[in-house]
Amino acid sequence: MFLIFGIRSKDKIVGSRLGRCEVCGATAAQTLVRRTTKFSLFFVPLFPVRAARHFVTCTNCGRSRAAAREELVAA
Ligand SMILES: [Zn+2]
């Protein structure tokens, strides 16, 4: 008998707004992404193993950074 288990992260876009990127300086759409990490058994995600994290991704340069708490409220 064998078990196939592991952890898997999944990203979900939860919002987008126009803003100035801190990396490239361009005014472009900034996408808010929520990343969840879950324990999976036989490729079926069962329960989260860490708290959800939020990132802001620039659509111009593609760089991501951790979202500030104020950005989560605005989204
Ligand atoms: Zn950028």
Image (cartoon, grey):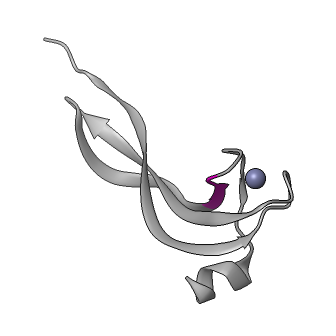
Residue 56: x, y in percent?
Answer: 65, 61
Q: Is residue 56 magenta?
A: yes
Please identify the residue farthest to the left as the structure is shown: 1
Of 42 and 64, nearer the camera is: 64
Left or right relative to 68: residue 24? right
* Count of numbered circles on the image: 0
Question: Residue 54: x and y, percent?
Answer: 60, 63
Q: Give the image quarter of residue 9.
A: top left
Q: Quadrant of the C terminus?
A: bottom right
Secondary structure mostly taken by the magenta-highlighted segment of the chain: strand
User: Residue 43 falls in which quadrant of the image?
Assistant: top left
> For the point 66% across and 44% down, which residue is it?
62
Query: Which contiguous range is marked in magenta?
Result: 55-59
* Magenta-drawn stretch contains 40: no
Q: Is residue 40 above or below residue 27?
A: above
Q: Is residue 26 above or below residue 8?
A: below
* Residue nearest the viewer, comparing 57 with 25: 25
Determine which quarter of the picture holds residue 69: bottom right
Question: Residue furthest toward the front?
Answer: 27
| Residue appearing at x 44%, y 62% in the figure | 13
**x and y percentages locating residue 60 in the rendered image:** 67, 50
Q: Nearer the viewer, residue 24 or 3?
A: 24
Q: Is residue 26 above or below residue 3?
A: below
Camera-nearest residue between 54 and 23? 23
Instruction: Give the quarter of the figure containing the N terminus.
Output: top left
Name the residue at 72% across, 59% down: 66
Horizontal side of residue 58 vs 21, given as left or right: left
